[in-house]
Amino acid sequence: MKCRKCCQKAIINMRQHRLAMCKEHFLDWVPEQVERFIHKYQMFSRQEQILIAVSGGKDSLALWDILFRLGFESDGLYIGLGIDEGIHYSEKSGQLAEAFANTRKLRLLTVNMRDEYGETIPQIADRTTRGQGKPCSVCGLSKRYIMNRIARQGGYHVLATGHNLDDEVAVLFGNTLNWEVSFMSRQSPVLEANHPGLVRKVKPLFRFSEREVAAYALLRGIDYIYEECPHAVGSKSIFYKEILNRMEEKRPGSKLIFYLSFLKAKENGLFANHAQEQVLSLNTCSSCGQPTTASGECSFCRIMLKQ
Ligand code: SF4
Ligand code: ZN
Ligand code: ZN
């Protein structure tokens, strides 16, 4: 297989794009495409301050590397979840995020759950009904809360996350199976800050498969955490990804078509009524002042205040 651009030996073949490339051209192609998508989907401009949610994994570090190379002003935010049983996931991922920032002289903000809130995610999960069995629900809502709070307090215009196509398609697949129309109406590569106190959220890697992002991180020599969070084992999202990978194997391009067709349907107004309801139903938390769909206290304040 030869590189489409220079006819040297290709190191990656992207069947869904009918495109093979050598290392050098692949490493140029990915940032070029990211810049194209940032522009196409109006994610942010060069004048805006970007905060990247950095987990220490391949996606978020690849995203930070790409935005840095493209010359966008971006800082990182690492949230220390305190998931350290077994493989020391949080400890290792925090060290890798820090090392990445230090070697490139980038600014990394850190929020440590234990230091800031007195409890780790597994501890909060253990004492709340919401967290029984698995800490993911508590973890997800805490991360969303903290990311929005830090982005707002720091005066950032936009919060960028490293979600790739496989992540997005797995979520869409799950929501479609359950016909979760209100969740579908909120799924997008760009979520505008359509309520006071919210920050725009963007996913600049949403058109790249997990394999492409992993290849980019490896070829670029980015040191990232290879292990998954131990709580991801057996998750629905991994199960959906396996099913979708089997489909992709037989029909390359299926994932991208599924997701882009969904965006097209949204653009044509398929979920318009639901999107409007979401905007109208946001309130302000009586305790912390952050936007919330709950009336009274937001879910984060509720899990933190209730013993
Ligand atoms: Fe948090 Fe669950 Fe993801 Fe682990 S797998 S980081 S607990 S949401
Ligand atoms: Zn080439
Ligand atoms: Zn609150």
Image (cartoon, rainbow, N blue to C red):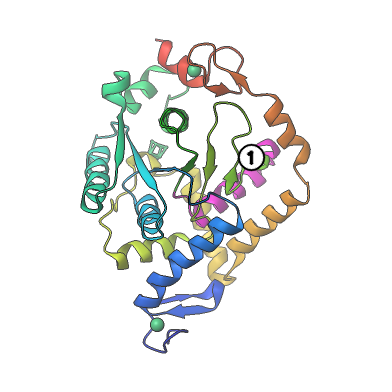
Identify which residue is drawn at 70% across, 39% down.
181
Above or below, 174 against 261 in this view is above
User: On the rendered image, what quadrant is the C terminus found in?
Assistant: top left
Above or below, 12 against 102 in this view is below
Q: Relative to the observer, which residue lies in front, 4 or 234?
A: 4
Magenta stretch secondary structure, dominant: helix
Q: Is residue 170 magenta?
A: yes
User: On the rendered image, what quadrant is the N terminus found in?
Assistant: bottom left
According to the picture, the residue beneath numbered tag 1 turns out to be 186
Q: Position of residue 13 (x, y in %)?
A: 45, 77
Identify which residue is drawn at 53% across, 14% down.
297
- Magenta-highlighted residues: 162-182
Q: Is residue 197 magenta?
A: no
Q: Relative to the observer, which residue lies in front, 68 or 245?
A: 68
Q: Position of residue 70 (x, y in %)?
A: 41, 60
**Can residue 134 be seen at all in this image of the molecule?**
no
- Answer left or right for 285 relative to 96: right
Above or below, 5 against 34 in this view is below
